[in-house]
Image (cartoon, rainbow, N blue to C red):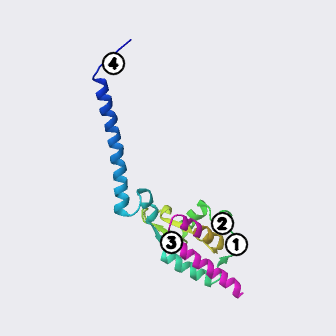
Amino acid sequence: MRTVPKMLYPCGLALFCMIGLTIGALAINVREQTTITGQSLATEKIRAVRLNQDAFDYARELIKQGHVVADGRCAWSQHQPSAEEENEFIRLHGFGEYAKWHLGIDDAHGEKTKARYKFPYGDLKNVHRCALLAIESRAAQYKHYGIENAALELREMISASNRDR
């Protein structure tokens, strides 16, 4: 039977203690970061999305002019523009016009990127009720309350304009 050298036990114990201290220090750093910023590191990027006021105003005008599709709750997956349609729209009209079709702006991405613009509310021609319903749900999920409230207001405008007809 082999014997383990007596120095191996203290070395193993020291290694085990160092691993435990390292894990503990990482946990404290994450807790301190959360305490300092009021949010976890994982949610900082989520919170970078803000309401695109120009898009909100544009959508209000489109609704007033009757550029609306009052579709059903689950229709957005069929009605949203494809990547090719978006690319063609950007080619013809530029990112400034493309931005007007999105209620959210993610400042973590550059101005001339599609990734910067979140929460599309229409098909680049009309405001879609189904898109606004999807925005309300997703914005609430990620705590983008300004965007959620804007989508709700736009959806209520559509409902009111349908009642007036």
| Residue position marked by numbered label 4 in the rendering | 4
**Residue for badge 1:** 71
What amino acid does circle 1 point to?
A: Asp
Cα distance in 3D space between marks 3 and 2? 21 Å
Classify mark 1: residues with Cα within 10 Å, few (<14), some (14-19) or many (20+): few
In this orientation, which residue lies closer to the viewer: 71 or 43? Answer: 43
Marks 3/1: CA–CA distance: 24 Å
Locate residue 83 relative to residue 163 in the image: left or right.
Answer: left
Q: Position of residue 18 (x, y in %)?
A: 31, 38
Distance in Å between CA atoms under marks 4 and 1? 75 Å
Q: Nearer the viewer, residue 125 or 14?
A: 14
In percent of the image, x 32 and y 33: which residue is there? 15
Are the residues tagged 4 and 1 within 8 Å (C-beta)? no
The type of residue carrying mark 4 is Val
> Residues at badges 2 and 1 in contact (C-beta under 8 Å)?
yes
Under mark 2, the amino acid is Trp
Q: Is residue 131 left or right of residue 9?
A: right
Q: Earlier in the sequence, mark 4 or mark 1?
A: 4
Q: Which residue is mark 3?
A: 145
Q: State how far apart marks 2 and 1 are (Cα).
A: 8 Å
User: Between disc 3 and disc 2, whose residue precedes?
Assistant: 2
Q: Residue at x 39, y 11 (%)?
A: 1
In this rendering, the label closer to the viewer, 3 or 1 = 3
Label 4 and label 2: CA atoms lie apart by 68 Å
Describe the element under mark 3 as helix, strand or loop: helix
Q: Which residue is mark 2?
A: 76
Q: How many marks?
A: 4
